[in-house]
Image (spheres, rainbow, N blue to C red):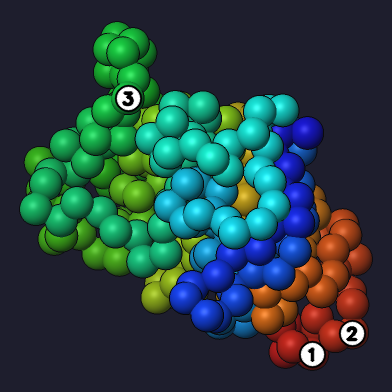
Amino acid sequence: MLLEVEDLSVAYARAQALRAVSLNVKDGEIVALIGANGAGKTTLLRSISGLKQASVGRIHFEGQRIDNRPAYEIVKRGIAHIPEGRIVFGPMSVADNLSMGAYLRRDKLQVREDVERMYSWFPVLKERRKQLSESLSGGEQQMLAVARALMASPKLLLMDEPSMGLSPLMVEKIGEIVRDINQTGLSVLLVEQNASMALALADRAYVLEVGKIALEGPAADVAANDGVRKAYLGC
């Protein structure tokens, strides 16, 4: 088991965002987490990556407890987080954004090779490598956010709403990128409101409702559930 979240509860002031949430991600899996706005999906990713402290529960990564560790140490252990809304470093160039993704690494030769690998995966970033990131389109910024996270050489990628605000064509492209990343052996925990895309990509899925896990199982079984079809798939 790569990631294990056990009975996690998280609160903001008096508002309870997560209530005894448990989930896991196995090595090499894509796991989808779907749910409505405000269900707690982003809070869960922030808790895993060390950006939000849980009040109750435990998080283990590769058998080691990480819920009491700072965010930079969690990155070093092999978890990269692509936040909602892309959040690239706008006043910096594409090339500098990629360099920032590898800021904790000391294998400089491999870092240079990985930059070239990102450019081979995302040719548009190579074309725009000297441009300021804030000048890129939404889809290009999402590609940059993915490439920057991959520059950390992670074992697990947390993706928060990667399709948000993108055209249908770009949503399809992002789905292809997620699948290609996973085929390299990288595990992915994918948070998505686009449930159709998420369930089509995932091996397993969880449905989060009002801070609680309401359903879990193989992605195909979750997609076939009547409640999920009505609430999230529009059928």
Name which of mark 1 and mark 3 comes first in the sequence.
Answer: 3
Q: Which residue is mark 1?
A: 230
Q: Are marks 2 and 1 in contact (CB under 8 Å)?
A: yes
Query: In the depicted view, which residue is nearer to us: 219 or 100?
Result: 100
State the SS at label 3: loop
Determine whether, in the image, residue 105 is placed left or right of residue 199.
Answer: left
| Numbered mark located on residue 226 in the image | 2
Q: Which residue is mark 3?
A: 104
- Estimate the x, y position of residue 230 in percent, counting from the top left: 79, 90
State the SS at label 2: helix
Name which of mark 3 and mark 2 comes first in the sequence.
Answer: 3
- Estimate the x, y position of residue 105 in percent, counting from the top left: 34, 20
> The N terminus is located in which quarter?
top right
Mark 3–mark 2 Cα distance, whole angstroms, equals: 45 Å
Q: Residue at x 89, y 77 (%)?
A: 225
The answer to whether residue 191 is seen in the rendering is no
Mark whose residue sits in front, 3 or 2? 3
Q: Amino acid at mark 2?
A: Asp
Q: Are marks 3 and 2 in contact (CB under 8 Å)?
A: no
Determine whether, in the image, residue 164 is placed left or right of residue 28.
Answer: left
Q: Which image quadrant for residue 183?
A: top right
